[in-house]
Image (cartoon, rainbow, N blue to C red):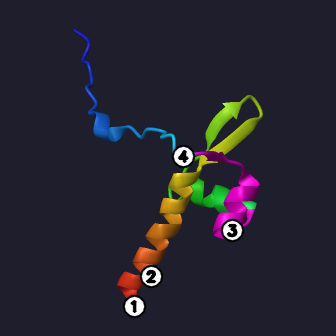
Amino acid sequence: MQEVQVSTQAQFKHFTHNDRVIKLRDVIELTGLKKTSIYNLIKKNEFPKQITLARNSVGWVQSEVLQWVNDLMINRDLLH
């Protein structure tokens, strides 16, 4: 008998009509990070992962990037 894993909907993120997909140049502009730093943080699971748009095209969900910046601000304020 094969075991079936049931996932709750809370585990899934949903793209909303208020969201948009942004390209790397926009991520760099929003965060102030360089391309290498962004990809290094992604590898360490410390930055939102990109989504594949097409064979040679990726983008990031803007709200996830903004939430990452917001989390940095919250952590900064908690530490000081």
Which residue position holds label 1?
80
| CA–CA distance in space, label 2 to label 1 | 6 Å
- Provide the secondary structure element on which disc 1 rests: loop
Which residue position holds label 3?
33
Nearer to us in this view, 40 or 56: 56
**Residue type marked 2:** Arg
* Quarter location, residue 29: bottom right
Disc 1 crowd, CA 10 A, few/some/many (<14, 14-19, 20+) = few
The spot of residue 34 in percent (x, y) is 73, 66
- Provide the secondary structure element on which disc 3 rests: loop
The spot of residue 77 in percent (x, y) is 40, 84
The spot of residue 19 in percent (x, y) is 54, 46
- Provide the secondary structure element on which disc 2 rests: helix
Q: Is residue 80 left or right of residue 22?
A: left
Q: Looking at the picture, does residue 78 appear above or below residue 23?
A: below
| CA–CA distance in space, label 3 to label 1 | 23 Å
**Residue type marked 1:** His
Mark found first going from the N terminus, 4 or 2:
4
Q: Looking at the picture, does residue 28 appear above or below residue 14?
A: below
Disc 2 crowd, CA 10 A, few/some/many (<14, 14-19, 20+) = few
Mark found first going from the N terminus, 3 or 2:
3
Give the number of the mark in front: 1 or 4.
Answer: 4
Mark found first going from the N terminus, 1 or 4:
4
Which residue position holds label 4?
19
